[in-house]
Amino acid sequence: MSQSAPVAPPPAPAATADGGLAALRAELDRVDDALHDLLVQRAGVVERLAALRAKGASPLRPGREASILRRLLRRHTGGLPAQALVRIWRELFAATTAMQGGFTVAVCEAEPGGTFVQCAREQFGALTPLHTHRSPAHAIGEVSAGAATVAVLPMPSETETPAQAWWTALLQRDEPRIHIVARLPFWAARPDGAPRAQALVVATVPPDPTGHDRTLIGLEIGLEVSRARLAGDLAAAGFTPGQIILRRDPGDTLAYALAELDGHIADGDPRLATLASARHPPVVLGGYAIPWDGGQA
């Protein structure tokens, strides 16, 4: 039986392409240096922005950050995963926001597992100071006292207890006024291992519009008002309602409603005064940039 000729070993990496492996590594080094130079340049622009900001004004701009991410996602090409682009810029936002003053996050983590802490880290960076609390009231209290810049709170639901229904306290418009400013996670398509918690972020700054937003309003309504009736009143006033949460707590003479509406709606919108179901003027609790679902940004 004839013996097959020995198989030649593959060529050395340095000979496989023009320039070779060493040249490609040198090119990566040049790109890394250029990226670093641009990061330093960007930080310098942030410092100039901070110098122009009014004294005591918060650098927090979640709507602006969402607009930047959408713009980058729309122009993104190549093999780098889009979710990696979001992670890189989220860390960049966290670092440059911290450059402009202290930045601390309060997180309501009522159950073991750290799900909301993971959600906060995804949004606000791995190194941002973070305090955990067992109740939403304590997390909001840190923001009110100025000990935290934002609080990450569980998404409201109709099954929560009165103590968990943190959004009802925002109807009082206490000073400093607390606003809903973001929804987490912004990257809505969840890869394996990513935290699944849905959360809202509150701060003492109002939300900034992005052109692709939702607003949350709170209302005090009669106990007899149904969800369908309230949705009809909102539509008749010119709004496009989404999810509506109703609370009828034992002993209360009024019910509370949390309504999600399409678009950015500001305080003083004349349509709010036309809602027949409201016993008192509705309160704009805030809003958020609609999370990106991995498709069109």
Image (tube, grey):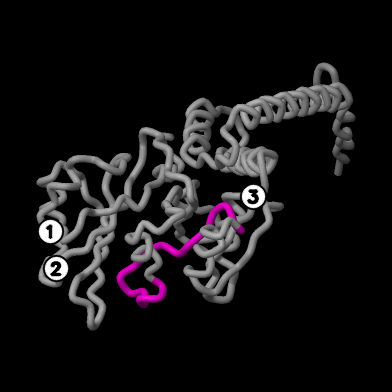
Q: Are marks 2 and 1 in contact (CB under 8 Å)?
A: yes
Which type of secondary structure does the marked residue at label 3 adopt? loop
Q: Residue pushed farthest bottom?
A: 251
Magenta range is: 147-164
Taking 246 as reference, is 121 left or right?
Answer: right
Pick whichever of labels 1 and 3 is earlier in the sequence. 3
Camera-side residue: 245 or 277? Answer: 277
Taking 148 as reference, is 205 left or right?
Answer: left
Pick whichever of labels 2 and 3 is earlier in the sequence. 3
Q: In which quarter of the image is residue 38?
A: top right
Which type of secondary structure does the marked residue at label 2 adopt? strand
Residue 277's disc number:
1
Q: Judge the density around disc 2: few (<14), some (14-19), many (≥20) Cα neighbours within 10 Å.
A: some
Residue 103's disc number:
3
Camera-side residue: 220 or 291? Answer: 220
Pick whichever of labels 2 and 1 is earlier in the sequence. 2
Residue 114 point in image, percent of width and height = 59, 68
Q: Quadrant of residue 192?
A: bottom right
Q: Residue drawn 72% across and 24% down?
A: 41
Residue placed under numbered mark 2 in the picture: 222
Q: Residue drawn 65% across and 29% down?
A: 51
